[in-house]
Image (cartoon, rainbow, N blue to C red):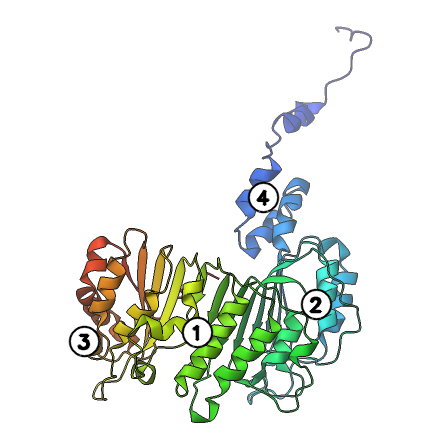
Amino acid sequence: MKRRQRGSRARPHGGCTMMASSRRLPTLPLDVMYAVLQDAPKPTLLACSVVSRTWREAAVPHLFASIEIARSAGNCSDINKELLDMYPHLTRHIRRLRIVYHKPRWSILPSDEYPIVDSDLLLIFSRRLPCLKEIYLRSLWISIAQPQSPDVLTTYRLNKLTLVDCGAEDRPISSADLHVLLQLANTVQVDMVDIKMQSVERQADNLVTPALLRLLDWRSLRLQIQWGQLNDSDRDLVFWLCDDLRVAFAPRSLTSLDMGCRTLVHVDDSLRKVGQFLVHACSRTMQHLSFPVTIESDLASSYPSEQANFWRVVHLHSFTSIETFELTLMVPTPGHRPPRAPLGTVCVAIIALLPRSLRQVTISLRDVKEASQIKSKKMLDLGTLDDALDARAPVLEKVRVVFRGLGQWYLVEFAMAAMKVMSKCRRRGILDIVRWDYDVSPM
């Protein structure tokens, strides 16, 4: 028998240890793994987090980057204890936080009670979540009590705050008080604010007035009133809405504005209020503007709405860097008396005041039921608008025509009619017919 040399060690049985170490899987750099998992769904991220320590380190930041909390009632202040205190190691990963109302399964009738949020809760989020960029609140009550925590101004800013169907505590959320929404949004410093509500009312017993608000320095505002169809009883909405926003905003802070209002009566006074708000709150170098007045028959019948001087009261000529512009047209129904000036001619007068930096124009057409409405020169006259837009080429790169409201099932027929009428933009390749439910806002 051959003797084993001194100092040598016996080889493990079968060489399993050496084989396992030599066949270890190679690892990717962490930055590559972050990029791969950036858009992965939650189930994939959860599976990757249990592969190994390295994969867990790469997956956990994406897994907890977006958190949604659903409540059926009660005060949401206990989120501070349930989430931030119990899981402090996850706070550095949260970038998007959603708090929404969860309707119980057994509930059939509309709820008369909603979860409550307040200004103190937003302050806690902004201080304890260092990477938080977006907050989304939907169908919640807002406490109108004054915040107990002092409002500490810091350099930290949220990217976006969204408020959907939120209203004052113990009041129907179907009719929101704009002052309460502005007060809550003003708690934290934010760049973009998106407010969506069914309707808006000015409460007589309002506990929050514009004087209590610190001047808003938002960069972008999107205000959508979903069911806010104005009538004669709501004709003063444009007056106080623009006045309250003008008082609340810091001068020349907005670079993007999307706010829709319908002007039915008192055209001159309403446009003057809109112009005062725009020239005060919007920066001279603003880039996006959704014109805050719907062009309809009553407005087009005002003399002389087809001339550019009529629209100088809105101060569109004061802005020098507008790149994207959106107009909404309420197309007259067939059989009705046409307006004094076609809606397309009115749009030409408005666009004439815009700077030469204009790159994209969006024309939203509402209540289109027949293709004859698009072809009509007395009601719409898109041919004149086509000539005006063609004259702005080649700086103008895109013209979008969006069909909204009734008749969306005839989109192909409407699109063919629009391309025939706007032939110059079509030949240049800048005309784009967008489906009726497409969100054209760059926000």
Name the amino acid, label 3: Lys
Marked residue nearer the N-terminal end (4 or 2): 4
Name the amino acid, label 4: Tyr
From the image, state whether disc 3 or disc 4 is nearer to you: 3
Q: Is residue 421 left or right of residue 30?
A: left
From the image, state whether disc 4 or disc 2 is nearer to you: 2
Q: How many marks?
A: 4
Residue plotted at (72% across, 56% down):
91
From the image, state whether disc 4 or disc 1 is nearer to you: 1
Label 3 close to label 4 by CB (< 8 Å) = no
**Residue 56 percent across, percent down from the top left:** 66, 46
Name the amino acid, label 1: Pro
- Asked if residue 302 is positioned above or below residue 151 in the image, the reply reads below
SS at mark 2 in the image? helix
- Asked if residue 331 is positioned above or below residue 190 in the image, the reply reads below
Label 4 close to label 1 by CB (< 8 Å) = no
From the image, state whether disc 2 or disc 1 is nearer to you: 1
Q: Which residue is under mark 2? A: 122
Marks 4/1: CA–CA distance? 42 Å
Marked residue nearer the N-terminal end (2 or 1): 2
Marked residue nearer the N-terminal end (4 or 1): 4
Give neighbour class at mark 3: few <14, some 14-19, many 20+ (Cα, 10 Å).
some
Residue situated in front as seen by the camera: 22 or 133 = 133
**Residue 179 percent across, percent down from the top left:** 62, 79
Label 2 close to label 1 by CB (< 8 Å) = no
Q: Which residue is under mark 4? A: 34
Name the amino acid, label 2: Leu
Q: In this view, does 60 lie to the left or right of 308?
A: right
Marks 2/3: CA–CA distance? 53 Å
SS at mark 1 in the image? loop
Residue 19 visible in the shown view? yes
SS at mark 4 in the image? helix
